[in-house]
Image (cartoon, rainbow, N blue to C red):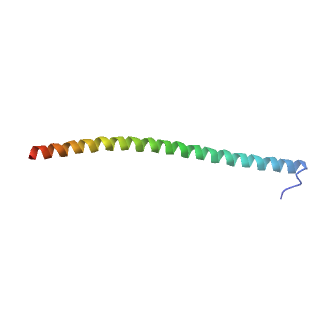
């Protein structure tokens, strides 16, 4: 049960509640930063994969053309 906010115990309870809010906020902020880093890493991986796929697509087209040319 909360005490009167003007009493010593009430002020202490208020301080503890404020610290709890700050801790929760810091934890959420850390989680958001962690998620942002994960998303950034995922973005980088997707760009690398896309680049690799472009190279493979070009090589496949070249090979197809070589097959077509060899049959003619």
The residue drawn where x is 70% and y is 46% is: 23
Where does the N terminus fall, quadrant-wise? bottom right
Q: Hey, which residue is sitting farthest bottom in the picture?
A: 1
Q: Position of residue 14 (x, y in %)?
A: 82, 49
- The image quadrant of residue 57 is top left
Q: Position of residue 52 (x, y in %)?
A: 33, 41
- The image quadrant of residue 56 is top left
Q: Position of residue 68 (x, y in %)?
A: 14, 46
The residue drawn where x is 53% and y is 42% is: 37
Q: Hey, which residue is sitting farthest left in the picture?
A: 72
Left or right: where does residue 34 sit relative to residue 17?
A: left
The residue drawn where x is 63% and y is 45% is: 29
Left or right: where does residue 43 sit relative to residue 49?
A: right
Q: Nearer the viewer, residue 61 or 1?
A: 61
Q: Nearer the viewer, residue 71 or 29?
A: 71
Q: Hey, which residue is sitting farthest right in the picture?
A: 7
- Disc tally is 0
The residue drawn where x is 46% and y is 44% is: 43
Q: Nearer the viewer, residue 55 or 40?
A: 55
């Amino acid at each position: 049960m909360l005490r009167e906010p003007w009493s010593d115990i009430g002020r202490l309870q208020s301080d503890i509640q404020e610290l709890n809010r700050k801790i929760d906020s810091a934890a959420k902020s850390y989680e958001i930063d962690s998620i942002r880093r994960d998303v950034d890493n995922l973005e980088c991986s997707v760009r690398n994969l896309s680049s690799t796929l472009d190279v493979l697509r070009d090589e496949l087209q070249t090979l197809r053309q070589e097959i077509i040319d060899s049959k003619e």
